[in-house]
Amino acid sequence: MKPQSFLSQNRSALWFLLSLTVFALIVTVLSDAMGNGMISTSFVKTLGKTLCLMLVAIAMDVVWGYTGILSLGHMAFFGLGGYMIGMWLMYARTEIIVTESLRAAAIPPTPQEIHDSVGTQIFGVVGSSEFPAIWLFAHSFWLQIAMVVLVPGVLALVFGWLAFRSRVTGVYLSILTQAMTLALSLYLFQNEAGLRGNNGLSGLQNLPGLEDLPQATLSLAFFWASAVALGAGYVLFAWVVSGKMGSVIRGIRDNESRVRFLGYHVESYKLFVFTLTGIVAGIAGALYYPQAGIINPNEVAPIASIYLAVWVAIGGRGRLYGAALGAALVSLLSSWFTSGGAPDIPLGFYTLHWTDWWLVLLGVSFVAVTLLAPKGIGGLFDLLGHRHPVPERVGDFGPDKGARRTVEGEEER
């Protein structure tokens, strides 16, 4: 008997990839870049950003829904990935502008003069012209791509090692992750941090050397890059939560002490999951912010990570596709309500402006889902597919008749 492939054993991953491919093809055919114009360039960017948010939501689901670690800091890794790629985008684009402006000079500028002029252009807004040490590799695309992985990964590794070795769990760990995010955002607000403080990094939608390429084409390229990253991330995490690895991390979620008693090094599993999801969140951020065009310290504020947890809860934690659907639904509804797409509702004595009430609606939805449908959107697929949890099997335990033990059925993904 031939062994089955991973995708054939994980039908949800296969269906997700097929749905994502069909969706990407439809968007491509209807986009401005293909000449149809049924989907505007701005909406293609919105869809591309939504795919990035779906990827970070899946990462959050693995660390929270499967491992039981309620992290309120994963959007910090998301933002750091955006900052790392944003540094190269700003440097390379500004270097092109400076070089062209100095080309007509009587004496050709030296590389150092160009470098100094680039620094003045970038940091003049904060009253400086010196490149901070953090910009050491900003001139190199590939080194900054490495930083997209390394910076969020190292931060997640160091923070996770310090927290897990101390066996901090539950709400205390959540508070620590939120404190980490708050400290990072407050640091980035300072001009001394070297990332332009409150101004952040802007103009990221202009790719160096591709200024003549239409935005419709660029937006579609980023959309496909986001789709590929989402598909690869889904398969990666579907592999992580399956097999022995998946059984161990779900065991940690349900009863950490029992898993430790069985001989597993719980801290290593938690550190692996926390670091891996932090890296994937950084990659998602590196794809998101060139489509958004700007990043500032508000993007890594603690409220952003709280929103991420809300998306996963609404989608249904413990289900990868549920987290993805929750992020997509809330992200698109947020864009619709806050951009004026939803019509105002006159009540006579008061006019309901959705731009003001969207967050209230989101909060009410979160409470309603938590109380009335704890399985979230993902639970609807269980009902539609007539999928039910495997019943518990009870048998005798020990020499005394009547002593019972529970053998849990394998949890469905």
Image (tube, helix red, strand yellow):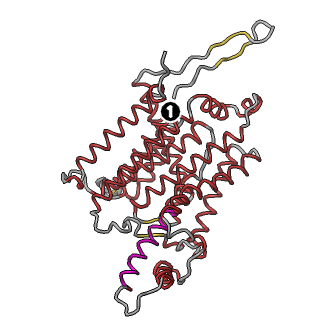
Q: Residue 99 magenta-drawn? A: yes
Relative to 232, does residue 387 appear above or below in the rendering? above
Secondary element at image label 1: loop
- Asked which quadrant contains residue 187, the reply is bottom right
Task: State the extent of the magenta-drawn residues as a range.
Answer: 83-101
Residue in the foreground of this view, choosing between 75 and 350 = 75
Residue carrying label 1: 375
Name the residue furthest top. Answer: 401
Q: Is residue 407 left or right of residue 36?
A: right
* Residue 364 image position (x, y, % from top left): 47, 45
* Residue 370 image position (x, y, % from top left): 52, 38
Residue flagged by tag 1: what amino acid is it? Lys
Name the residue furthest right. Answer: 399
Residue in the foreground of this view, choosing between 3 and 14 = 3
* Residue 183 image position (x, y, % from top left): 64, 63
Residue drawn at x 39%, y 52% is 334
Look at the magenta stretch and give its main secondary structure: helix
Residue drawn at x 46%, y 42% is 232
Residue drawn at x 44%, y 27% is 11
Residue drawn at x 62%, y 38% is 67
| Residue 264 in sight here | yes
Q: Is residue 27 left or right of residue 412?
A: left
